Image: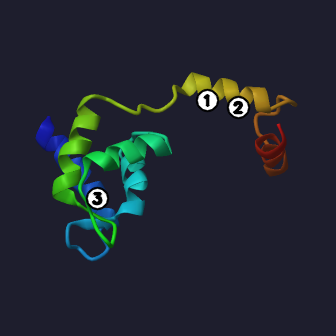
Amino acid sequence: LVAKIEKKITEAFEVFDRESNKTVDVREIGCIIRSLGCFPNEAEVQELLAKVEVEEPGGFVHLEGFLPVMTKVLLDRRFQPIPEDVILHAFEALDENKCGYITKEDLVKHLTEE
């Protein structure tokens, strides 16, 4: 199980490893974590980064530092997505006309005004 998880993490990491040198820009870590099905908020991403050595001054994260931290996150099932029924309920609350969709304009209005 651990080997399978580590392989999944490594593959996600490599997508963002532009120079193929087992490092990624620290700003990519949130995207990598979310691509693995975890949904931490930004403060939680920063907590994880505190556990990973970040190369200064460039702000790069090495796979060897990221792998054990992220493996533990996945094994512990941390940062699970919001359940589908909760998202559906939120969508239905925004779909005032009960038409099964929300227009871009309505979504912008809800997100900026309400």
Instruction: Estimate the x, y position of residue 86 in percent, counting from the top left.
Output: 60, 23
**Image position of 80 (left or right of 11):** right
Q: Quadrant of the C terminus?
A: top right
Front tag of 1 and 3? 3
Query: In this orientation, which residue lies closer to the viewer: 15 or 44?
Result: 44
Q: If you read the primary sequence from the N terminus, does the residue marked by circle 1 or circle 3 appear first?
A: 3
Instruction: Give neighbour class at mark 2: few <14, some 14-19, many 20+ (Cα, 10 Å).
Output: some
Give the mark toward the camera: 3 or 2: 3
How many angstroms separate mark 2 from mark 1 (CA)?
Answer: 6 Å
- Mark 1 is on which residue type? Ile
Label 3 sits on what residue type? Phe
- Residue placed under numbered mark 1 in the picture: 87
Coordinates of residue 67 in the picture (x, y in percent): 20, 49
Kind of element beneath mark 2: helix
Report the front residue among 42 and 16.
42
Q: Are marks 2 and 1 in contact (CB under 8 Å)?
A: yes
